[in-house]
Amino acid sequence: MSLLNTLIVKTLPIIPKSIIKSVAKRYIAGDSLPDAVRVSKELSTKGASSTIDVLGEFVTSRERSLHEWQTASSVLDAIAQNKLDSYLSVKLTSLGLDIDREFGFANVRSLVEKAAELGIFVRMDMENSPYTSLTLDFYKRLRAEGFDNIGVVLQAYMRRSEDDIRSLLALKPSVRLCKGIYIESPEIAFKQPDEIRTNYKKLLRMLLDGGANVRIATHDDELIDDAIGYVTKNNLSKSQYEFQMLLGVREERRKEIIRSGFGMRIYVPFGSDWYGYSTRRLKENPQVAGYVLKAMFTGG
């Protein structure tokens, strides 16, 4: 990572939002659900499926959380009506988790129930550490109620993830394994890139060997190559795993993985709450900070 890219990332808070938005178009389908449907259809022609996410988190009012619930419900309708090879991703704090735990659970449960009726899968995204245990508890509750169209996310930089996997394996869970992006303290999270990669590889093997259904979510060549080597060496069924990437990130590598015959799913976010999501993407991928610099001088 160059010194210039590092400087751009550190100064994101003072860069005009209009500049960030011009860069955000790379990572976000658009402001509306039809944008997400359009992008999902385009991805399908390129050999990739999708998961649609409504941007927004840390909601503090019941009115807003119900609005987010309605939008997520509309995503399910759109997936069914358009026969998309897609599922729904949701953040629990957008559905009222911070307002009232049982209110939030009722909201996500009703979405999962509707999705089950439509034959659609739902994945609960993992947020920062105050919500890790709550998210896993919700997952276990939903599985206990008989829902099997629900999945969760684990983050390789969290020190607790190994124990979390052990607590889930009996359920043969569907897990998206990612590195993790929120800023956490070194007491609970690995901070060095090599530490995170080492733990990612360890957790991936625990999940695959334990019979979990694994979504290998990474743009890191070392981790991608390691995963391909492991699933190939062990002749694992492609129904047990797929690769996942973010919209707008490492598209050439994405094409290579698809050409190699592996399943690929792209995370397709949409909505007006684009700023927080986009700045996290830039902080995670400072090598694309050059797009910000270009936008500052060209206006797009």
Image (spheres, rainbow, N blue to C red):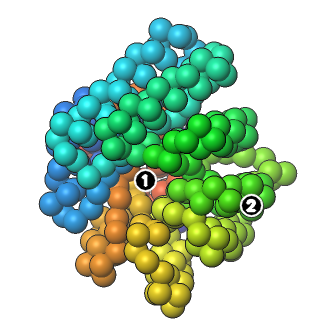
Looking at the image, how many numbered discs can be counted on the residues?
A: 2
> Identity of the amino acid at label 1?
Ala
**Which image quarter holds the C terminus?**
top left
**Residue at 59% over, 69% down:** 211
Residue 144 picture location, percent across and down: 63, 41
What residue is rendered at 57% in x and 64% in y?
212
Query: In the image, is residue 62 above or below residue 234?
Result: above
Residue furthest toward the right? 187
Residue 103, image x, y percentages: 59, 17
Image spot of residue 152 (x, y percent)? 56, 48
Q: Which residue is drawn at 26% across and 52% down?
A: 85
Amino acid type indicated by mark 2: Arg
In the figure, is residue 215 to the left or right of 177?
A: left
* Tag nearer the camera, 1 or 2: 2
Q: Please tell me whether residue 288 is drawn above or below residue 226 in the rendered image.
A: above
Q: Mark on residue 95?
A: none
Against 116, residue 59 (above or below) is: above
- Which of the two residues, 202 or 119, is positioned nearer the viewer here? 119
The crowding category of the residue bearing disc 1, from other C-alpha atoms within 10 Å (few below 14, some 14 to 19, many at least 20), is many
**Element type where label 2 sits in the image:** helix
* Quadrant of residue 266 within the rendered picture: bottom left
**Circle number at residue 289:** 1
Check the image and report above or below for 95 versus 181: above
Determine if residue 141 is in view: yes
Task: Check the image and name the residue furthest to the front.
Answer: 146
Residue linked to disc 2: 166
- The mark nearer the N terminus, 1 or 2, is 2
Q: Residues within 10 Å of mark 2 (few under 14, many from 20)?
A: few
SS state under label 1: helix
Residues 152 and 106: in front is 106
Q: Residue 294 in the image: state x and y as whole percent.
A: 31, 50
| One can see residue 256 in this view | no
